[in-house]
Image (cartoon, helix red, strand yellow):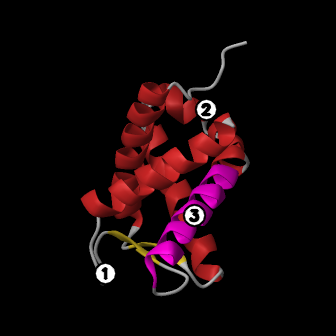
Amino acid sequence: MRTVVRILVSAFALWLTTLIVGGSGEHGVWITALGGGDFDYLITLVLIALVFGLVNGTLGKVVRFISFPLYVITLGLFGLIVNGLLFWVVAWLSGLAGFGLHVGGFWWGVLAALVMSVLSGIMNGLLGTRKKKD
């Protein structure tokens, strides 16, 4: 149940991120839905949140492990670059599927990743869906 709530929180944070960092054309971050209806837009948000979770759980862990020395040297600021890269990968993967996330450039992806991580962190903290510390 916690996983479903976290996916829904990610989808909501993604929607808020597109409102804050959103744009059209070549600037910002925006979503292209599967169809034309509101329900299609919600399904697209949930699918992108799933893809984001999979990319972050697999490729993200590998990239963070490999770039650990850069995290230490930059006191963690390199994490913004890694998160922007992962955001861009999600946009590329969803573009291959013919729907989804569009990022106007790498730095728009970095800004969107920063906004989304802050929003999802706040919402997960309020809902109590943070990962358990065993």
* Towards the viewer: 39 or 91: 39
* Towards the viewer: 71 or 22: 22
**Three-letter code for the amino acid on which mark 3 is drawn:** Ile
State the separation of the CA atoms marked 2 and 1.
32 Å
**Three-letter code for the amino acid on which mark 1 is drawn:** Glu
State the separation of the CA atoms marked 3 and 1.
20 Å
Instruction: Place residue 6 in its image quadrant.
Output: top right
Residue placed under numbered mark 3 in the picture: 48
Contact, mark 3 vs mark 1 (Cβ under 8 Å): no
Q: Can you name the residue that lies furthest to the top here?
A: 134
Residue at left 30%, top 84%? 25
| 81 left or right, relative to 27 | right
> What secondary structure is marked by label 3?
helix
Magenta span has 47? yes
Number of residues whose C-alpha sits closer than 10 Å to that of mark 3, classed few (under 14), some (14–19) or many (20 or more): many
The mark that comes first in sequence, 2 or 1, is: 1
Residue placed under numbered mark 1 in the picture: 26
The magenta span reads: 37-55
Q: Is residue 82 visible?
A: no
- Which mark is on residue 68? 2
